[in-house]
Image: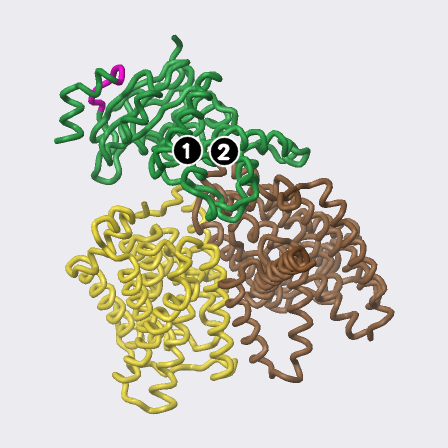
């Protein structure tokens, strides 16, 4: 199996604090990876580095073998990585259908004038994640579950090969979790890969093939979900 | 050459005082208050009014000017800025219009002519063979006293450390229980007070006019970019770079080009090291 | 539901009729108003152009420019200098207007790109800071460097006019104004405009949508500088003079910003109305509010608008229209 996305020896310091410490892991094509770790273990930080929000102090990020460590964010997205945010970041003043449409606009001035994506296509994406009937609503009118769907729709609209999901289950009701879970599994069947970050082990379990556990920005353990949950080191990290 | 050094040092102290409040607000609150230089101007007018038009003793006039600066700052913050900390665009536009508003108010009260404010400390001193006005020395002493007081405050008091915490890591600071609104309020009050002190001395350094806020604002921009937005050490260093460049330009090159080298340095710094010398 | 989406295409053809009505009205206006009002309309038209050009960049992307007069002034100075120099030794360079006008515009675009592009790569307030610095630098250079060429403090008077007379100038200004308005309005409503407005809301997320925000910001700035330059060259030849105190002043800057703010940032149409509104209100309040009080009142209104109605009069007009729509739906 080819390695789709790989981080090698990533280290990142903020002032005196070492946020990520020589972290390496990868995800193969066709698998779903879970990223686990207690609060503050660096999960969002490594996502930020993968997406290019800031560069690592050392180490590499490789997408299908290509070194993208210093590529700008939009370039990486065009190559096929997308993400959702831990706290949803919708465009406050836009109805969500317009919000999703921004993700479909091509990275070119002339192309944008010529039209970009048809509205029907955007509506299809919105329906696909389950937002039918709420197209012209504004973010402040929506439930957390719907906001997460918008995040997902925006990510999917960029036609990614892999999506980084940062705590997509946080703040959802049990029913909403089930629906998002079904949606993700449908996407997986369509060939999309995910790295899923979540505290909610129960939600994570049915989705992931393999899990990587980190703590204090360091690699702790890796393996299939059931084995990991039983792992002594992992338990120590979570329960102290 | 020595004259450049001496006058440069004096001007730099004054600039540091002006820019300090400006950068503190950005460091703690992440917004730029473009009316800051306007407070300097108004405070200068208040000092003039209190001591020369009303005839109050110097100490009282000082207090009035400082209180004006602090009051304007706190007023601006409480009236609207605190609600728009997430939207720098609105803060930008509203505070520069506020600066213009202050200019209009001062014009209505004092008219457009340039007012020559008599020096606070009269007389001159000989330094290294050059005559330097005592007033400028007083400004230098006042500036460094205030700067020292602020640095001490930041390092020793609880609130001061809270300010530094918020500047370094906003989320972390809030989680630790620091109340950002209260700390912001105090930061604005302090910066306004600093503007007040600056106003007193700036008005006697140059003349007083309602449009006097524009030039210090522009030079404050240069100072904080060069020094690094939000950094106090950076501001002090930046103020000296800008102050010396301006003095050297006025004395050695061309009086009318006074601001150009400082601004050019600002642009170069922006291209080469956008965070400035000490910025994050 | 379709109506709420900002589509280009169907909706713009419908909206085009509003533009045609506006153009028609403005064209016949001089027949009904005294010459003094016509002259005022010319000034208002130019202010509208400047306000719209500022809005295209600053109102949409949120990158506030405090150096807009610098672009206008740069264009004006280039065309002024190349078309007429007062009393100095040979060699004279006197170029015809059809050469100097485009050169002036090119100067605004070229000079603007040179100074502003580096600061657009950096997130944060730096763009605003650099823009004000740019204006100050130009101001100083014009006064101090070779004042015999640049006219120094006095400026360059006695410039040739493009057309003579209030009425021809009115139509010239009007034509420029509508061309600018429709062009920028089209961009604002297009996908490009949506990206720009999204940049203001959350630039990181726009980047994460696979769009190079720098590319789009640069384009917005290009349009902004182009239209500022266009307005600048014609304005200079309408006033037939240019001086640093007027061209590079904070008063000019704030006239532009306040027009845009009161009209409604990010809407193009709002700043257009704002330019006319500012010009006429200042004139007609003259007998009622003396001098500085008018300016003060204006500034206070502007602050109020920025805080409570950032979408300005345009937003208020939209709210009123929506309220009417809701009522007719319920009532009838």
Chain A's colour? green
The subunit carrying tag 2 is A
Residue underneath mark 1: A84
Q: In the rendered image, which quarter is residue C216 located in? A: top right
Chain C's colour? brown
Image coordinates of residue C86 in percent, x first then y, are 72, 64
| Residue situated furthest right in the rendering | C31
The structure residue drawn at horizontal position 82% and vertical position 75%, both measured from the top left corner, is: C34
**In yellow, which chain?**
B
Q: In this view, does C167 lie above or below A34?
A: below
Magenta span contains residue B246: no
User: Would you say the residues marked 1 and 2 are in contact, meaning their CB atoms lie under 8 Å apart?
Assistant: yes
Image coordinates of residue B119 in percent, x first then y, are 34, 81
Q: How is the image coloured?
A: by chain
Q: What element carries label 1?
A: strand
Of the pair A155 and A107, the residue shown nearer to us: A155
Residue underneath mark 2: A154
State the predominant SS element of the stretch in magenta. strand
Q: Give the range drawn in magenta.
A: A219-225
Q: Is mark 2 on a helix, strand or loop?
A: helix
Question: Which image quarter holds the C terminus of chain C?
Answer: bottom right
Of the pair C237 and C92, the residue shown nearer to us: C237
């Amino acid at each position: 199996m080819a390695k789709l996305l790989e981080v090698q020896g990533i280290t990142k310091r903020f002032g005196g604090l070492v946020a990520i410490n020589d972290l390496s892991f990868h995800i193969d094509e066709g698998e779903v990876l879970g990223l686990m770790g207690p609060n503050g273990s660096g999960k969002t930080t490594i996502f930020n580095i993968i997406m290019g929000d800031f560069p690592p102090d050392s180490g590499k990020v490789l997408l299908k073998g290509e070194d993208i460590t210093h590529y700008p964010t939009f370039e990486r997205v065009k190559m096929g990585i997308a993400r959702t945010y831990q706290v949803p970041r919708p465009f406050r003043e836009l109805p969500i259908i317009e919000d999703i449409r921004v993700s479909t606009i091509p990275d070119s001035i002339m192309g944008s004038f010529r039209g970009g994506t048809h509205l029907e296509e955007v509506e299809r994406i919105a329906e696909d994640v389950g937002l039918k009937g709420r197209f012209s609503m504004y973010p402040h009118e929506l439930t957390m579950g719907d906001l997460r769907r918008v995040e997902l729709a925006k990510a999917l609209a960029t036609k990614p090969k892999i999506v980084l999901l940062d705590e997509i289950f946080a703040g959802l009701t049990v029913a909403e979790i089930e629906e998002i879970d079904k949606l993700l599994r449908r996407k997986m069947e369509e060939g999309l890969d995910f790295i899923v970050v979540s505290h909610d082990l129960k939600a994570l379990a049915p989705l992931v093939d393999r899990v990587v556990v980190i703590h204090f920005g360091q690699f702790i353990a890796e393996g299939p979900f059931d084995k990991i949950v039983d792992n002594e080191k992992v338990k120590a990290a979570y329960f102290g | 050459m020595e004259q450049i050094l001496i006058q440069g040092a004096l001007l730099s102290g004054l600039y540091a005082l002006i820019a300090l409040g400006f950068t503190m607000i950005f460091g703690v609150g992440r917004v730029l208050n473009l009316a800051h230089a306007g407070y300097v101007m108004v405070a200068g007018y208040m000092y003039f009014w209190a001591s020369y038009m009303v005839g109050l003793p110097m100490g009282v006039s000082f207090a009035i000017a400082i209180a004006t600066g602090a009051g304007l700052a706190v007023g601006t913050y409480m009236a609207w800025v605190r609600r728009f900390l997430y939207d720098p665009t609105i803060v930008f536009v509203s505070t520069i219009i506020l600066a213009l508003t202050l200019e209009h108010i001062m014009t209505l009260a004092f008219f457009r002519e340039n007012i020559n404010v008599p020096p606070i400390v009269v007389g001159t001193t000989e330094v290294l063979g050059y005559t330097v006005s005592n007033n400028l020395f007083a400004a230098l002493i006042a500036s460094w006293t205030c700067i020292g007081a602020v640095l001490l405050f930041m390092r020793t008091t609880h609130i001061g450390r809270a300010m530094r915490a918020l500047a370094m890591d906003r989320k972390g600071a809030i989680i630790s229980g620091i109340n950002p609104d209260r700390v912001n309020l105090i930061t604005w009050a302090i910066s306004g007070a600093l503007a007040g002190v600056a106003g007193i001395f700036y008005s006697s350094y140059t003349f007083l006019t309602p449009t006097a806020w524009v030039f210090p604002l522009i030079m404050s921009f240069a100072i904080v970019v060069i020094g690094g937005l939000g950094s106090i050490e950076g501001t002090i260093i930046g103020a000296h770079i800008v102050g010396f460049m301006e003095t050297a330009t006025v004395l050695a090159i061309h009086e009318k080009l006074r601001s150009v080298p400082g601004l050019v340095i600002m642009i170069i710094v922006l291209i080469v090291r956008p965070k400035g010398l000490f910025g994050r | 539901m379709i109506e709420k989406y900002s589509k280009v295409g169907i909706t713009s053809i419908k909206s085009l009729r509003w533009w045609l009505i506006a153009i028609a009205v403005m064209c016949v206006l001089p027949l009904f108003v005294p010459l003094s009002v016509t002259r005022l309309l010319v000034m208002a038209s130019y202010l509208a152009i400047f306000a719209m050009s500022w809005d295209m960049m600053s109102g949409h992307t949120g990158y506030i420019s405090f150096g807009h007069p610098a672009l206008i002034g740069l264009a004006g100075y280039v065309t002024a200098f190349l078309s007429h120099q007062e009393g100095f030794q040979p060699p004279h360079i006197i170029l015809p207007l059809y050469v100097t006008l485009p050169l002036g515009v090119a100067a605004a675009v070229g000079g603007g790109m040179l100074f502003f592009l580096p600061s657009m790569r950096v997130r944060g307030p730096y763009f605003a800071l650099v823009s004000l610095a740019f204006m100050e630098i130009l101001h100083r250079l014009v006064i101090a460097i070779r004042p015999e060429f640049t006219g120094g403090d006095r400026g360059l008077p006695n410039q040739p006019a493009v057309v003579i007379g209030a009425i021809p100038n009115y139509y010239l200004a009007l034509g420029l104004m509508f061309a600018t308005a429709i062009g920028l309005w089209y961009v604002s409503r297009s996908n490009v405009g949506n990206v720009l407005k999204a940049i203001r809301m959350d630039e990181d997320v726009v980047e994460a949508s696979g769009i190079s925000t720098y590319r789009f910001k640069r384009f917005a700035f290009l349009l902004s500088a182009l239209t500022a330059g266009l307005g600048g060259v014609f304005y200079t030849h309408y006033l037939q003079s240019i001086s640093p105190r007027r061209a590079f002043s904070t008063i000019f800057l704030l006239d532009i910003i306040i027009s845009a703010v009161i009209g409604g940032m990010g809407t193009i149409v709002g700043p257009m109305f704002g330019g006319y509104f500012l010009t006429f209100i200042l004139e007609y309040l003259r007998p009622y509010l003396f001098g500085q009080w008018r300016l003060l009142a204006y500034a206070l209104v502007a602050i109020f608008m920025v805080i409570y109605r950032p979408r300005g009069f345009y937003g208020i007009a939209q709210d009123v229209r929506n309220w009417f729509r809701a009522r007719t739906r319920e009532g009838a």
